[in-house]
Structure formats: C-alpha cells, structure tokens
Image (cartoon, helix red, strand yellow):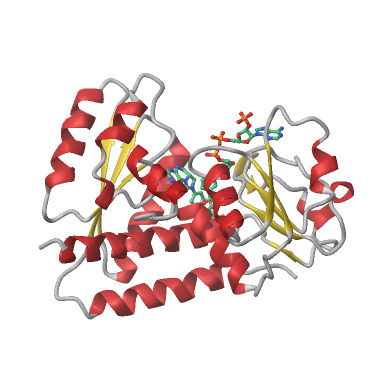
Amino acid sequence: MIIDGKEISKKIREEVKREIREFGYKPRLAILMAGNDESSKVYANSKVKACENVGIEAEIYYFSESEESKFFDTLKFLNEDKNTHGIMIEMPLPKNFNAELVYDTLNPYKDVDCISNYNMGRLFAGKPLFVPCTPKAILHILESIDTQFEGKHAVVIGRSNILGKPVAKLLLDKNCTVTVCHSKTKDLAYYTKQADILVLAAGKMNLVKGDMIKEGTILIDAGINVYDGNIYGDADFESVKDLCSYVTPVPGGVGPVTTAMILKNTLEAFKYAIKST
Ligand SMILES: NC(=O)C1=CN([C@@H]2O[C@H](COP(=O)(O)OP(=O)(O)OC[C@H]3O[C@@H](n4cnc5c(N)ncnc54)[C@H](OP(=O)(O)O)[C@@H]3O)[C@@H](O)[C@H]2O)C=CC1
Ligand SMILES: Nc1nc(=O)c2c([nH]1)NC[C@@H]1CN(c3ccc(C(=O)N[C@@H](CCC(=O)O)C(=O)O)cc3)C=[N+]21
C-alpha cells in the first residue's frame, strides 16, 4: 500500500490549527537561511505558507555566505526575543559558518528541529525537549499504519545527526532491533534484505531496488534527490512498490509530514514559552 503523506500531514495541521485558535495570540517561528541554495529557499517559502495556514507567524531571515557575524547577532537576538517562540535553522549551513557554535548558541527551548548539542544530548538520554521534525514524521507515519515494532528488525540507511541517528534511536525506544548502515557499509543488500522496517535517509537516488528487499517490508523513504527538475527518493519506487506492505512515495510521503511536524514543534515551543512566564 502506498502511504499518503499529504493526508497524514493534513490531520496534524488541522489539530495544530485548532489548538492555536484557543490561545490568545500567535506563535512565531523564525527561519534562518544562510547561503544561496535555491531549493532550500523554495522549502523555506513553503514552510512560511504552511505556518500561516495554521495561524503561526513565520519570518525568513536571509544571510549571504559573508554574513556570519550578522547571522550570530540575529540568532542571539531571537534567542532572547519574547515574541519569537521557535527558531529553525536551515541545513546545511555554508561551509565557512561555524556550525558547532550554532549548535552551542541556539536557545534549546526554541530549537524546534532539535539541532543544538543540548537537545541532542537530551534526545539520546530519553528526555527530549523536541524530537527533530523528519524523524518525528517517520515515527508518526509508522504509528499511523499501526506498525508492530517490538522485536522487528529495523534497518536505517544514513547516520546524520538530523535524520539517521535520531531515527535509529527512536526505533530502538520502540524495541526494534536496529541496524544503521552508512557509506562505508559493505554489502548494503545483505542488511536491507533482512529489514522488516527499512528507512532510507542517504540522499542517493536509486540506492535501493526491488531485488534488495524482502516481500512485505515497510519502506519509509526520506531521501530527497532532484534530477531533471523532478524529485525522487532513495528507492527505485517502481521496482519496490509492489513488494512492500507499505511504502512512502516521493513526493507526497515523508516531506509533507515533516512540514506538519515543524508546525507541531513550534506549537510546543510556544507552550514552553507560556509555561516560563
Ligand atoms: N523528507 C524530508 O523532510 C527530509 C529529507 N531529507 C533528505 O534525506 C537525505 C539525507 O539527509 P541528511 O541526513 O541531512 O544527509 P547527510 O548527507 O547528512 O547524510 C547522509 C547519510 O547517508 C549515508 N550515505 C550516503 N551515501 C550512502 C550510500 N551509498 N550507502 C549507504 N549510506 C550512504 C552517509 O554515510 P556517511 O555517514 O558514511 O557519510 C550519511 O550518513 C537527503 O536526501 C535529504 O535531502 C533531509 C531532511 C528532511
Ligand atoms: N534544520 C533542517 N531541518 C530539515 O528538516 C531540513 C533542513 N534543515 N534543510 C532542508 C531539508 C529538506 N527538507 C524537506 C522538507 C519538506 C519537503 C517536502 O515537503 N517535499 C515535498 C515535495 C516538494 C516539491 O515538490 O518540491 C514532498 O516530498 O512531497 C522536502 C524537504 C527539510 N529539511
């Protein structure tokens, strides 16, 4: 069955919208965007639209590659700004930016995508302030199809701090047996063939094909690859789709649910702010 990420996203957005309506004023999300990546700009604009549709005020702050100090000044201002509840920093940052300093500077209570070192620590200690948006989306999708996690073999391809690692940790919390593969993994197919749940988060088109998976697997494809003006996941969708019990398409799978989770986390940041006043 092909999972409809747009439908799942719609439900989350409606819930967030309903909850926001009950508050007297609007949550505010600041999106910091450094560098000149055109596709990131498109995503940032679509996030603003999604925010506005549920009653979240959103503003994008643009910085060129030569504006690192202005970027940090803005970040420090937003960290303290009472009117800003969530801060989302678009990744990747330009190479010349001190990313480590960003992870140490961002106010953890506003860190809606869980990129700060403090929040990464809390996440892995099992007491997260925020669960990062894409991993949260992936777990939500799995829960929405009533996945039985316990004792299942989950294979995650990718080990980035923002995606692969937290997904693996969340699946471990669900009592899956988890294998994490990466670019140095030998014989990827050996692992993918064993997967009851397979999560793709590598950013490599056609990385997984039909002959690399077992029948009945649940395949969640978080990859986003742009080719010839179209977007594709990490799986060769045509060759895997009939073998999987469930599969997410790209577009229309993990992406829209991720956007919904940004809204949900912004609402959570708003609640932290209310609690602390
Ligand atoms: N749908 C959504 O909402 C989102 C989608 N994405 C997409 O997910 C993908 C991954 O993103 P992100 O984690 O940020 O990317 P990174 O580039 O940070 O990480 C990619 C990971 O995949 C591994 N990898 C790369 N090539 C291979 C290979 N041939 N075989 C096995 N493993 C491989 C890398 O291994 P190693 O560690 O050894 O280098 C690395 O761990 C991208 O396509 C990105 O666009 C990202 C965020 C949100
Ligand atoms: N701190 C941080 N967190 C992120 O989560 C993050 C990031 N930085 N930098 C960029 C990547 C990319 N990303 C996407 C989100 C939604 C869609 C999405 O909604 N895609 C639509 C398709 C859109 C289209 O057609 O172009 C879909 O898959 O259906 C895609 C990609 C989040 N990212």
Q: Position of residue 229 (x, y in %)?
A: 60, 42
* Up-down relation of residue 39 to residue 171 (above or below): above
Q: Position of residue 6 (x, y in %)?
A: 55, 68
- Image point (55%, 73%), residue name: 7
Nearest the viewer among 66 and 22 is: 22
Quadrant position of residue 85: bottom left
Is 51 placed left or right of 149 in the picture? Answer: left
Nearest the viewer among 74 and 162 is: 162
* Up-down relation of residue 28 to residue 120 (above or below): below
* Up-down relation of residue 112 to residue 33 (above or below): below
- Image point (67%, 34%), residue name: 182
Can residue 229 be seen here? The reply is no
Is 227 placed left or right of 92 in the picture? Answer: right
Quadrant position of residue 1: bottom right
Quadrant of the rendered image holding ligand 1:
top right
Query: Going by the picture, which residue comes out furthest to the right?
Result: 211
- Image point (52%, 53%), residue name: 135
Q: Position of residue 268 (x, y in %)?
A: 30, 63
